[in-house]
Amino acid sequence: MKYNIIKFFCYSASILILVSCKVNTSKNEKDDGWEYLFNGKNLDNWIVKIHKHELGDNYQNTFQVRDGVIQVNYKGYERFNERYGHLFYEKPFSNYHLKFEYRFTEEWMEDAPGYTYRNSGVMFHSQDPKTILKNQDWPISVEYQMLADAGDGNPRPTGNMCSPGTEVFFEGEMDPRHCISSSSDTYLWNEWVQAELIVQDSLVIHKVNGKTVLKYTKPQIGGGTTEGYDPEIKQDGKLLTQGYIGLQAEGQGVEFRDIKIKRLE
């Protein structure tokens, strides 16, 4: 009898400890400051803008939710026809740490430019999607570019920087290149990759699978690449410290999941 009583109290104490740990873990996760931008169910709080279409027109359901991920899907397309698309979160951010995971799908529109093969990205410091004109191809923004193995035996790092309508300082100098390659490894197209973007004042850091692969500073409006924009928006030389975050669709199928952000001081 005494043994059973002791056993009961030990069991009860164990349950209390487990419950306490679970409560504390949940509290710590909440207090950790991370906010999920994607709810895993629908595209609430996101805004679609596709080249040649009005704001909010999700042509042929390009952006959709499947099995808990945001998927760029071209099954309804006959031709790509330069329908570069972006799915923007509804509000802008400054000074933050963004995390997400991505992988490519087998789908690729063959009439899209060749460079779009196993290529996508996440735009940040973007102009307000409401200011993007119907026939503007790319938002004025900075891009965290995602690439994967193209099957040709050549290295193809991911977590690169591209600059539609913008410029950055790299290694202390203004860099004229549209894209700057990172130091990351090359990953398979169907492999989930963990991506991170840290924006702190004028410093930008790209990370891939936990490793820092690229740093640069002073992102600002300037340069070329983007076309069809409102000239009043493209104020060359204006430093960018805040803006909208957008998921890219440029002819290659891709999936995004676990998109979360933490605001930094």
Image (spheres, rainbow, N blue to C red):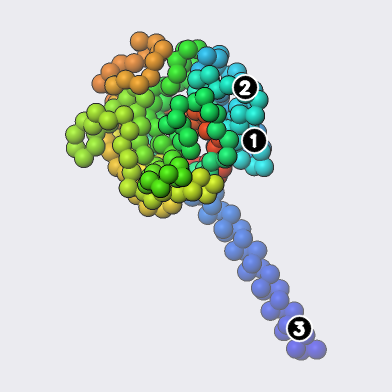
Residue at far front of view: 152
Callout count: 3
* Residue 233, visible in the rendered structure: yes
- Where the N terminus falls, by quadrant? bottom right
Q: Earlier in the sequence, mark 1 or mark 3?
A: 3
* Label 1, label 3: how far apart the Cα atoms are: 53 Å
Q: Earlier in the sequence, mark 3 or mark 2?
A: 3
Q: Earlier in the sequence, mark 2 or mark 1?
A: 1
Task: Give the image location of residue 84, x and y in percent.
Answer: 50, 23
- Horizontal arrangement in the rendering, residue 219 relative to residue 131 (left or right): left
Q: Quarter-wise, where is residue 240 in the image? A: top left
Task: Give the image location of residue 219, x and y in percent.
Answer: 30, 30
Task: Give the image location of residue 264, x and y in percent.
Answer: 39, 41
- Point 60% across, 18% down: residue: 57
Q: Which residue is mark 2?
A: 78
Q: Which residue is mark 1?
A: 65
